[in-house]
C-alpha cells in the first residue's frame, strides 16, 4: 500500500484525487522539494500550474552557496580536472562527510597533467573548524590559520599577506602557505558549506588577486549534491535558483519573500507540499499549515492530510542527479528496482487530476 | 488532415522564384497540391510572405555555461518580465520555456547550441528538452581535451582520431564538431594568457593550427555534414583580422565554418589602434569558396558574454558590467561568463559597423549566416531590428547618426547601399543553414519537407514583420498566431551517429577508469535519461 488519507490507507488514485482537490483549493501553496532532477522538473512545473512557491527542503543551507553565484561569481573547477591537475590542494574550513570519498580519491592519486606531479596539502582553519576528518589527516595537510579567529578573518589576512601587505593577526604556518603557493603550478582551494558571505567573498577575492599573474582556482563542493541539482534545474526552467514562486503567474525570485519556513511560520501559506526521497525526512509535526507528504515511508506522516509513499531515484527507479565528483549531471540506474512510484510519476497523475478539478481563477 | 496555407507570397529559394502559391500540409509534412484540391482547414494569408521556418546555426541557448549565466545574473532575468523595452535584456529569452516561445514567435523553428562540452552533454540535453516548440541540435567542443591532444602529440593514426571524434559526437548526441581557440584552454591552465594559431601547448607540443587541421580532416572523413565550426584564436583583439585570414588560408580548400567573424574583423589603425578590417576580410571570404561564416552581430545594450574561450573571457573580466563574472576550468573545455554592456562609444560603434559590413560585403547569402552569437553580440530577440538594418539602408544610415562618427569613418559602412531582399533573407536564414547542417528535411517548402512554416505580414515595418509572425507551423502544428504562442509541443534534438570501431569504447572505458577512477557510465547516458518521449532524431552522415 502506498498512500494514506490521514491515517487511513487508501488506493493511490484516491490519494491523488484528494491532493488535487487540496491544491486546486489552495490560494497560497508552498512546496518543499528534495528529489532528483526529474522529480524537481515535474514539481516546478506543478508549482507554476498552481501558483506555488518552492524551495529545497534544506533551503537555508543553500542560501549562501546560491548567493556566491548570484552576487559574486568567481573561479571554479571540476573535481575531475582538479584530480588530474592540482599540485597543491588547500582545504578551506571543514568539508562535509559526503565529500570525504572525493578527498580520499584526491589523496590517493597524483596529478598527471602538470609537470609538478607530487600533490601537496594545506588546510586553512579558523575558530569554527572542527578536528581534521580522516582523508585530510591521512595526507598530513599543513594547518594554516588560527583557532582564535573566524575563518573569514583568516582568509582576509592570508589575502593581504599574499598581496604583500602587512596583517596583524598572528597565523600559524604562514611561511609554508607562501612558499607552497609560490611553487605550485595549479593550486586549488577546496570549500564546502562555508556559511558566511564574507568568507566566500574573501576567498574569491584572493583567487582574483592570484590570477592576475598566475593560475589558481576553487573546487566548490555543494553542501548537498541533490540540492545543487535542484538549483540547476530551477535556473534553466525559470531563470532563477530556488526560493522562487509563481504567485503572480510569472516566476519571482526573492530569498526573503519566498522563504517557505517564514511563509509557514507567519501564516502566509495555506498548504504545504513536502516532498523528500530521503528515508529520514518528514514534514514538521509542529506546522499548523495543512500538509501533504510525498515521502519514503511505510507509515503515514504524522499530522499530514495525505501521505504518498514514493520511490528514490537510483534505488527504486532510474533518475538524474548532480554529482560533485564530475561537476555535472549524471544518469543513475535503479539499483533495487521496485514498484514504488517516482515523484515525476505522481506529479504526472496530479497534473492529470487537476485538469478535472480546475484551478481558482 | 490536409491544411492549405492559401494565397501568400511564397519565398522559397530552393524551389523557385517568389510568387503567389498555396502551400499544402499533411501529417506534418509539405505535400504537392492534392488531386482533390480540398483541404480540411484553410488559412488565408494573402498579403503575407510565406517562408520555411528559420534556422539559427549559432545561439547559446542551453548547457552548463548558459545556466551558470542565469545563476550569475538573476537581476537580468527579472527584466525578462513585461518591462519597458529599453531595460537590460528586456527580451533576452532567458529560461528554457521563454527561449522556445520567443524563437517561435519570430518564425524560427530550429536552433543550434554551438558549444556543448561533451562531459556536460546530459545537462545540455536536459535543458534543450525543456525548450518547447522548436527543434534543437548541438555541436560538441573538441580541441582542448587531453585524450585528443595526447593522440596528436603521439602521432596517432587518422583512424584512431576518427574513432574518438565519432565516439564523442555519438555519445554526446551532437550534430557536429566545434573547436574553440584550439589548445588555449589547456594552455591557460598552464598560465599562458594569449594563444595564436601557431602557438604551442607546452605539455603537448601541439600547435593550435595542428589541432584545427586534425579535427577538420576527421570531420571530413567521417562524413559529418557540417564543416568544422571554428571559433578562431585572438577573439576581440585589435589586429586579429590577420588571424582570421590565416585560419581561412589554413583550411587549404577544405570546408570550414568560421563562427562570429565580426569579432575577428579588427585592424590596428586610427588613434585608438582599433579599426575595421571587415572589407578586406569580406573580400577574402568572397574569394574562398570553401569558407562559410556567421557574423555574431553586435547590437547596443546590456548582455552577457558566454564562451568556452577562457583566455578571452579572463581578459574580458576587467570590463565586466555589472562587476561580477565566473571563470571555469573544466575537463578540456572551460567557460567564462562575463556580463557586458555594448555602448554607443567608439569601440561599440566600430563593432556594430564591422558586423554590418560583413553582412553587406559578403556577396553570397549561401555562405554568410544570420547570428548575434546570442547572447554574446546581442540577445537573439534583437533579430527583428537586425533584419531591418540589413533590408533598409535608410534605417541603417539613420542609426549611424546616433553613433561615434570617428569610429564609423574607419569603416566602409556609409558607402554601402546594398539592401537584403526577402529572397536573400530566406537563403541566409533557411535554405543555407539547412544545407550547411545537412538537414534536407527543412529550410524549404518543397514536397517532403517537414511543415515548418513561417508566415509574415508584409509591410514597411520590417521589425514588426519579423518580430510577430502572423502564423507559424512546427511539423504542421499551428503554434503561433499573430505573434502569440497558441499551442505548445516538444521538439526534438537532432544528432549524428557516425560509424566507429567498437574498440574505442573499451579504450574510453579504460581511460576514464584510470584517469578519473570512475566507470565510463558516469560520463554517458541513454536516451531514456532525458525523460521525454523520443527526445532525439538521428540525421544521416554523408556517404
Image: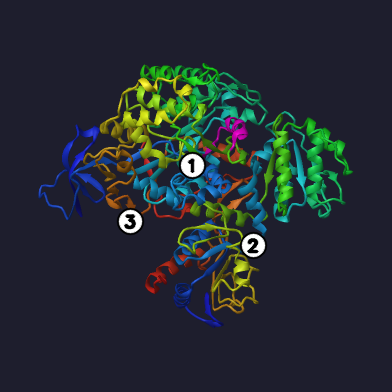
Q: Identify the subunit bearing mark 3.
A: B
Q: Chain of mark 2?
A: A
Q: Is residue B329 above or below residue A104?
A: above
The first of marks 1 and 3 along the sequence is 1
Question: What's the image's color scheme?
Answer: rainbow
Which range is magenta?
A: B303-320
In this rendering, position of residue A184 left or right of residue A280:
right
Marks 1 and 3 share the same chain: yes
Rendered location of residue B460, percent (x, y): 26, 38
Residue labelled with disc 2: A58
A134 lies above or below B240: below
Q: Residues within 10 Å of mark 2 (few under 14, many from 20)?
A: few
Residue A178 place in picture, x, y as percent? 82, 35
Residue drawn at (40%, 36%) of the image: B57
Q: Quick check: A84 left or right of B353?
A: right
Q: Which part of the image, by quadrant, shows the N terminus of chain B?
A: bottom left
Q: Is residue B209 above or below residue B124?
A: above
The quadrant in which the C terminus of chain B is found is top left
Residue B273, located in which quarter of the rendered image? top right
Amino acid at each position: 500500500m502506498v498512500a494514506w488519507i490521514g491515517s487511513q490507507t487508501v488506493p493511490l488514485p484516491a490519494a491523488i484525487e484528494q491532493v488535487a482537490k487540496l491544491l486546486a483549493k489552495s490560494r497560497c501553496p508552498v512546496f518543499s522539494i528534495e528529489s532528483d532532477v526529474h522529480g524537481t522538473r515535474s514539481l516546478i512545473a506543478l508549482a507554476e500550474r498552481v501558483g506555488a512557491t518552492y524551495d529545497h527542503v534544506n533551503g537555508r543551507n543553500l542560501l549562501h552557496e546560491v548567493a556566491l553565484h548570484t552576487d559574486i561569481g568567481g573561479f571554479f573547477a571540476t573535481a575531475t580536472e582538479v584530480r588530474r591537475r592540482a599540485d597543491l590542494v588547500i582545504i578551506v574550513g571543514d568539508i562535509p562527510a559526503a565529500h570525504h570519498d572525493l578527498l580520499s580519491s584526491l589523496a590517493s592519486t597524483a596529478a598527471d597533467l602538470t609537470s609538478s606531479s607530487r600533490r601537496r596539502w594545506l588546510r586553512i582553519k579558523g575558530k569554527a573548524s572542527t578536528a581534521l576528518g580522516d582523508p585530510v589527516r591521512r595526507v598530513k595537510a599543513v594547518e594554516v590559520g588560527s583557532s582564535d579567529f573566524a575563518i573569514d578573518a583568516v582568509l582576509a589576512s592570508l589575502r593581504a599577506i599574499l598581496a604583500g601587505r602587512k596583517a596583524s593577526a598572528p597565523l600559524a604556518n604562514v611561511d609554508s602557505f607562501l612558499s607552497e603557493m609560490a611553487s605550485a603550478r595549479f593550486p586549488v582551494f577546496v570549500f564546502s558549506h562555508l556559511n558566511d558571505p564574507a568568507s566566500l567573498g574573501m576567498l574569491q577575492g584572493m583567487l582574483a588577486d592570484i590570477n592576475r599573474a598566475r593560475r589558481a582556482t576553487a573546487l566548490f563542493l555543494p553542501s548537498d549534491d541533490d540540492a545543487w541539482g535542484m538549483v540547476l534545474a530551477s535556473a534553466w526552467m525559470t531563470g532563477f535558483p530556488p526560493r522562487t514562486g509563481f504567485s503572480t503567474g510569472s516566476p519571482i525570485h526573492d530569498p526573503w519573500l519566498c522563504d517557505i519556513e517564514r511563509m509557514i511560520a507567519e501564516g502566509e501559506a495555506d498548504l504545504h507540499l513536502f516532498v523528500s526521497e530521503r528515508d529520514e525526512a518528514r514534514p514538521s509535526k509542529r506546522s499548523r499549515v495543512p500538509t501533504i507528504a510525498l515521502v519514503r515511508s511505510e507509515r503515514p506522516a504524522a499530522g499530514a492530510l495525505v501521505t504518498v509513499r514514493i520511490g528514490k531515484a537510483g534505488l527504486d527507479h532510474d533518475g538524474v542527479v548532480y554529482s560533485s565528483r564530475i561537476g555535472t549531471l549524471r544518469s543513475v540506474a535503479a539499483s533495487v528496482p521496485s514498484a514504488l512510484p517516482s515523484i515525476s510519476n505522481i506529479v504526472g497523475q496530479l497534473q492529470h487530476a487537476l485538469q478535472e478539478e480546475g484551478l481558482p481563477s | 488532415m490536409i491544411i492549405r496555407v492559401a494565397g501568400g507570397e511564397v519565398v522559397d529559394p530552393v524551389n523557385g522564384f517568389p510568387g503567389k502559391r498555396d502551400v499544402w500540409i499533411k501529417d506534418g509534412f509539405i505535400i504537392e497540391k492534392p488531386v482533390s484540391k480540398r483541404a480540411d482547414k484553410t488559412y488565408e494569408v494573402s498579403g503575407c510572405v510565406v517562408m520555411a521556418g528559420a534556422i539559427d546555426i549559432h545561439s547559446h541557448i542551453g548547457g552548463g555555461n548558459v545556466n551558470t549565466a542565469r545563476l550569475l545574473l538573476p537581476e537580468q532575468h527579472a527584466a525578462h518580465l513585461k518591462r519597458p523595452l529599453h531595460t537590460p535584456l528586456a527580451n533576452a529569452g532567458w529560461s528554457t520555456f521563454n527561449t522556445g516561445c520567443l524563437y517561435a514567435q519570430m518564425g524560427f523553428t530550429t536552433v543550434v547550441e554551438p558549444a556543448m562540452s561533451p562531459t556536460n552533454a546530459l545537462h545540455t540535453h536536459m535543458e534543450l528538452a525543456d525548450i518547447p516548440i522548436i527543434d534543437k541540435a548541438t555541436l560538441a567542443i573538441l580541441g582542448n581535451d587531453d585524450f585528443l591532444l595526447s593522440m596528436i602529440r603521439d602521432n596517432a593514426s587518422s583512424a584512431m582520431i576518427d574513432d574518438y571524434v565519432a565516439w564523442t559526437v555519438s555519445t554526446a548526441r551532437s550534430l557536429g564538431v566545434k573547436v574553440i581557440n584550439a589548445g588555449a584552454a589547456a594552455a591557460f591552465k598552464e598560465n599562458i594568457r594569449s594563444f595564436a594559431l601557431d602557438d604551442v601547448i607546452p605539455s603537448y607540443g601541439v600547435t593550435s593550427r595542428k589541432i584545427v587541421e586534425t579535427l577538420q580532416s576527421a570531420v571530413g572523413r567521417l562524413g559529418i555534414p557540417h564543416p568544422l565550426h571554428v571559433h578562431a584564436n585572438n577573439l576581440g583583439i585589435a589586429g586579429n583580422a590577420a588571424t582570421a585570414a590565416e585560419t581561412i588560408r589554413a583550411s587549404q580548400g577544405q570546408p570550414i565554418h568560421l563562427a562570429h567573424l565580426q569579432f575577428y574583423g579588427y585592424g590596428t589603425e586610427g588613434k585608438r589602434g582599433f579599426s575595421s578590417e571587415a572589407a578586406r576580410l569580406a573580400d577574402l571570404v568572397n574569394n574562398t569558396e570553401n569558407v562559410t561564416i556567421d557574423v555574431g552581430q553586435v547590437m547596443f545594450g546590456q548582455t552577457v558574454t558566454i564562451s568556452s574561450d577562457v583566455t578571452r573571457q579572463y581578459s574580458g573580466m576587467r570590463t565586466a558590467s555589472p562587476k561580477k563574472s565566473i571563470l571555469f576550468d573544466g575537463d578540456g573545455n572551460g567557460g567564462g561568463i562575463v556580463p557586458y554592456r555594448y555602448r554607443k562609444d567608439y569601440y561599440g560603434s566600430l563593432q556594430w559597423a564591422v558586423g554590418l559590413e560583413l553582412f553587406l560585403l559578403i556577396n553570397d547569402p549561401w555562405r554568410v549566416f544570420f547570428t548575434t552569437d546570442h547572447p554574446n553580440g546581442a540577445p537573439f530577440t534583437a533579430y527583428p531590428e537586425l533584419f531591418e538594418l540589413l533590408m533598409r539602408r535608410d534605417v541603417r544610415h539613420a542609426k549611424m547618426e546616433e553613433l561615434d562618427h570617428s569610429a564609423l569613418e574607419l569603416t566602409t559602412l556609409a558607402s554601402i547601399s546594398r539592401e537584403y531582399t526577402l529572397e536573400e533573407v530566406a537563403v541566409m536564414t533557411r535554405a543555407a543553414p539547412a544545407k550547411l547542417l545537412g538537414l534536407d528535411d527543412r529550410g524549404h517548402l518543397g514536397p517532403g519537407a517537414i511543415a515548418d512554416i513561417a508566415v509574415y505580414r508584409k509591410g514597411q515595418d520590417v521589425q514588426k514583420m519579423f518580430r510577430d509572425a502572423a502564423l507559424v507551423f512546427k511539423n504542421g502544428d499551428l503554434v503561433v498566431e499573430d505573434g502569440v504562442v497558441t499551442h505548445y509541443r516538444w521538439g526534438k534534438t537532432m544528432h549524428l551517429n557516425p560509424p566507429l570501431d567498437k574498440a574505442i569504447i573499451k579504450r574510453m572505458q579504460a581511460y576514464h577508469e584510470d584517469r578519473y577512477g570512475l566507470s565510463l557510465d558516469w560520463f554517458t547516458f541513454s536516451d531514456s535519461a532525458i525523460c521525454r518521449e523520443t527526445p532525439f532524431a538521428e540525421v544521416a552522415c554523408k556517404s
